[in-house]
Structures are given as structure tokens and as C-alpha cells.
Amino acid sequence: MPKRTMRPRNARRLPALLLTASLVLGACEQPPEMQEAAPERPVLTLTLQSSEDMASRTFSARAEAAEHTALAFRVSGQVASVQADLGDRVIEGDVLARMDDRDYRLKVRELEGQLEAAEGQLQEAEVNYRRGQTLVQDGTISRADFDSLRSAFRQAQGQRDATREGLATARAALDDTVLRAPFDAHVARRNIEPHEQVSPERVVFVLDRLDEIELRVGMPETLVVHRDQLTGVKVHFAALGRQYPGRVQAVGVDVDEDTQTYPVRIVVDNPDQRILPGMTARLDFRADLDAAGEQGYFRVPMTAIFDHDGQPHVWVLDEAGETATRRPVSLGPLERDGARVQGDLHAGQQVVTAGVQHLREGQKVRVLTEDEMRGARR
């Protein structure tokens, strides 16, 4: 019987191992461009602004009257005459319109007569009450009769007081048949004509006070944080070809959810009253950031800063905005909306603000568009 030749147990695995090794070595010998590259990552970025750029901003706004008041009669009736027209300048106390006051004058006369009668009755009741005080003491009248005299006196007092109050109300209503200007202003709207029937709910005039003009803008957080360093506002009206100094009157503390800006109200003196409501203006803001210690710093959100080898870094993109590079920075003061950083940075660079922990040196990135960011928020 022929002898069997015994093969080593691992002999059968040897070709497979050699094949695997050749594949691995082949992969290692492939040029870099053939190896699998790191995937392109979508990122959010912020463009760095210099302190000078952050300190000055330009906005557009429309002029509004500093005081815009709707006027109505306090009583109902028929309009007798109108003394003011659209665009007229009126002085405080000027008559704007009069109402037919015949019924109100008759009411006043009626209550004046009633008051006179009530005072006569009170005078008589007081005389009887004073006499009763003497008679009850010597027993000429009973205590019950005296109590009646005192009650009549008090009723007469109440009647006189009620009539007096009614007369005061009637006189006020008579005065309210004349509509007067509450302050110096211009007539912005006239909604009334003679012989019309009007009621207290109906606005008949709208007045604009034009000695001051207001403008409202939405200011981004990068500028509103420097509101205490605002050195002034220049307001230019193209229609007038003039520039006016403005001042910040108020700054809102709640951000507008739609625009993500803070409401700011600017006031401009308008002594010649050439600025009219509705005129468009360009507002140039400037803040003194040198005094605020901002010079040389860039402001970034905290999400842009990460630690690498024990030092804070940020990711910056190349000029094409396609590759991320680590850049060490030194931190300035931390603030509510981010931090100030210094380093090998310059204005105009794009800094990654989201996903910084997932990037690698030299990794390709894709900057998300505003539409993509809005879609992600939904």
C-alpha cells in the first residue's frame, strides 16, 4: 500500500496569507492620491471684523414724528365748524374744531338754576336746624322733632353737593365741545367736516410734533454691546442734502425674533422743521472701541474656540474657503455673546463656529449657505 505524504496543517492557509499580505502591501504602496481622503465636512463660519469695522455701521431708516397723537371729541354731537386743515401748524391751545353746543349750554343753565334752588333750601334747612338746637335744649320741641330738622339739613347739604357736581360735569362737557391743540404741532390728518355727527370713539385729527424726529433701526449684537461707547450718530437726509447730529434715545434689551436685532431709537433735533415724517435717512454709527479695550482683538462666539495641546485654538479657512487650518489664539475678556481673541488672524478671514471638534488639520470643508442654515433650524 503506497504511503501517504503528510502536509503541514498550516500549508493550506499559506496562499491565503500571502494574498492578504500582498494586498496590504499593495495598498501601502499606492500613491497618496489613491488613498481614501477625509470626508468633506459642512461648517458654519464667521467672517472676522476689525475693531474699526465693528465700530462703524450704516443703517437706513424712515423719519417719524417724536409725538404722534390722535385726537377725538370727548362728547357726542354735530360739528359746527373746523378751524384747522391738513398740514397747518397749530400752537398749543389753538381751536381745531367746534361742536354745536346748544344742548350743553342749556344743560349748564338748567343745573345752575337747580343749584341756586338747592342752596336756598340748604340755607333754610340750616336756619331751622340751628333754631332747633336751642329749642330742644329748653324742651320747647321734642328730640324726635329735632332729629327731623337735622335730617332735613343733611339732605339739603347732599342735594346741594350733588347738584354742584352735576354742574361741574356739565360745564366740562360744554368745554369739551371745543377741540384744542394739546401742544405745538402740525396737522397730519383731518377726518372731520362741518355738520358731521361725531362720537368720542372717532378720531378727528392726528397731530405730529416735529421739533424732534425719531428714527428706529435694528442693531446687531456685535454693535449693540458697544452702546455705551457710541460717540455719536450722523443722520443724512438725501432729500434735504443735509446731515444732522443724532443721539441714541433708547436701546431695547429683547432681541427681535424675526430680524435677530435689537431695536434702537434715535432722536434728531428739527428746529426748522424741514424733516418730515416718512423721509428716508442714512444713519452712520460709530463707537469708540479704543476706550473699550477692543483694539487688536477679534470677537468670536465661544463655539469657535477649542483646546489643542493645552492651548486655545480656532479653525480658519484658506482664501478659497475650502480647507481648515488650526490657529492658536490668546483669549481676551469673556462676554455674554462670546470672547475676544488675538493671534495670527486678520480681518476678512473665515473662522469655523460650529463642529470644531470634528475637524482635522487640512480637512476639506463646505461652508453652509444661509438657506441651508435656515432649513437646518426648521
Image (cartoon, rainbow, N blue to C red):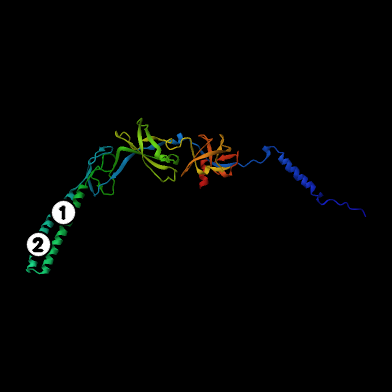
Residue 164 place in picture, x, y as percent? 17, 54
Residue 312 place in picture, x, y as percent? 54, 41
Q: Can residue 372 be seen in this view?
A: no
Could you tell me which residue is drawn at 41 percent across and 43 percent down?
262
Could you tell me which residue is drawn at 14 percent across and 55 percent down?
115
Q: What element carries label 1?
A: helix
Residue on which disc 1 sits: 111
Disc 2 crowd rating (10 Å Cα; few below 14, some 14-19, many 20+) is: some
Q: Can residue 366 be seen in this view?
A: yes
Is 95 placed left or right of 251 in the picture? Answer: left
Residue type, mark 2 in image: Arg
Residue 335 place in picture, x, y as percent? 46, 43
Q: Which mark is residue 255?
A: none
Q: Residue furthest right?
A: 1
In depth, the one of 309 and 121 nearer the eye is: 309
Q: Give the answer, above or below, for where 148 lies relative to 329.
A: below
Where the N terminus falls, by quadrant? bottom right
Is 265 placed left or right of 111 in the picture? Answer: right
* Residue 41 found in image quarter: top right
Is 151 placed left or right of 257 in the picture? Answer: left
Residue 361 place in picture, x, y as percent? 60, 39
Could you tell me which residue is drawn at 13 percent across and 66 percent down?
147
In depth, the one of 88 and 216 nearer the eye is: 216
Residue type, mark 1 in image: Leu
Residue on which disc 2 sits: 130
Disc 1 crowd rating (10 Å Cα; few below 14, some 14-19, many 20+) is: some
The reply to whether callout 1 and callout 2 are in contact (CB within 8 Å) is: no
Q: What element carries label 2?
A: helix
User: Which label's residue is closer to the chain start, 1 or 2?
Assistant: 1
